[in-house]
Amino acid sequence: MKASQTINNLKPKTYLSIITLFITFLFITSCSKKDDSNNCIEHTISECNEDSTKVNIRITNISDNVFCNVVLIDMNCGIIEQNQSSCYRAFESGYNYSFIELEIDGNTYTIQPIDFVGETPLENGYYTYQINTNDSNQQYEKLTLTFVED
């Protein structure tokens, strides 16, 4: 009788252990890598303000990644999907490269110019910065910029 009482006393603990393991398994398997196209928390986007009397720049994403919170100089261009472009934003001046910061899968990557000494300012018009990525995971090395005069 004592052996059966011991087994009966263990059953609720065993069931509790099985349920705990099952819930833990569900929790672990439900956690997945963040997908910026669905989970990007977009910051306030700067208004599109194209002006033919100024330097107008847009960003085109030519990578295989979704870009989140793309900042061009001081303007947030929002989310830019693969093979998509932001709208043009007007600037008083610009160069064939600029400060760009964005997020991919929750990680921040930056193109950070040191200065523009010796660079020729762009004439008023329309330009595109094509942004691609490489295999680096370093904040200042992952992004590449190709300048295009539109």
Image (spheres, helix red, strand yellow):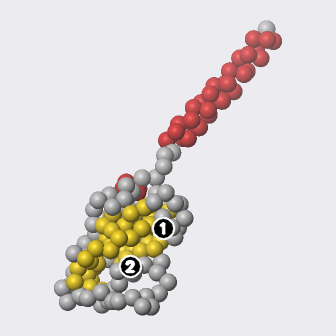
Amino acid marked by disc 1:
Tyr
Q: Secondary structure at mark 1?
A: strand
Rate crowding at label 2 as few (under 14), some (14 to 19) or many (20 or more) other CA atoms within 10 Å.
some
Amino acid at pointer 2: Tyr
Residue 28: image location, x then y, percent: 55, 41
The residue that appears at 66% across and 30% down in the rendered structure is: 17
> Quick check: 75 above or below 141?
below
Q: Residue furthest left?
A: 52
Q: Quarter holding the C terminus?
A: bottom left
The disc label shown at residue 97, or none: 2
Q: Which numbered disc, 1 or 2, marks the residue that appears first in the sequence?
A: 2
Report which residue position mark 1 lands on. Answer: 109
Image location of residue 23, percent across then percent down: 56, 36
Question: Depth check: 148 or 47 in front?
Answer: 148
How many marks do you count on the picture? 2
Residue found 33% across the figure and 61% down from its top: 62
Secondary structure of residue under mark 2 = loop
Q: CA distance from mark 1 to mark 2?
A: 15 Å
Task: Choose between 46 and 131: the one closer to the eye.
Answer: 131
Residue at the spot 57% in from the left edge and 35% down from the top edge: 25
Q: Is residue 5 left or right of residue 50?
A: right
Q: Residue at x 30, y 87 (%)?
A: 122
Question: Which residue is outermost to the right?
Answer: 2
Image-based side of 120 in relation to 12, left or right: left
Q: Residues within 10 Å of mark 1 (few under 14, many from 20)?
A: many
Q: Report the front residue among 138 and 70.
A: 138
Residue 86 locus on image (x, y percent): 28, 69
Q: Is residue 108 above or below residue 55?
A: above
User: In which quadrant will I find the N terminus?
Assistant: top right
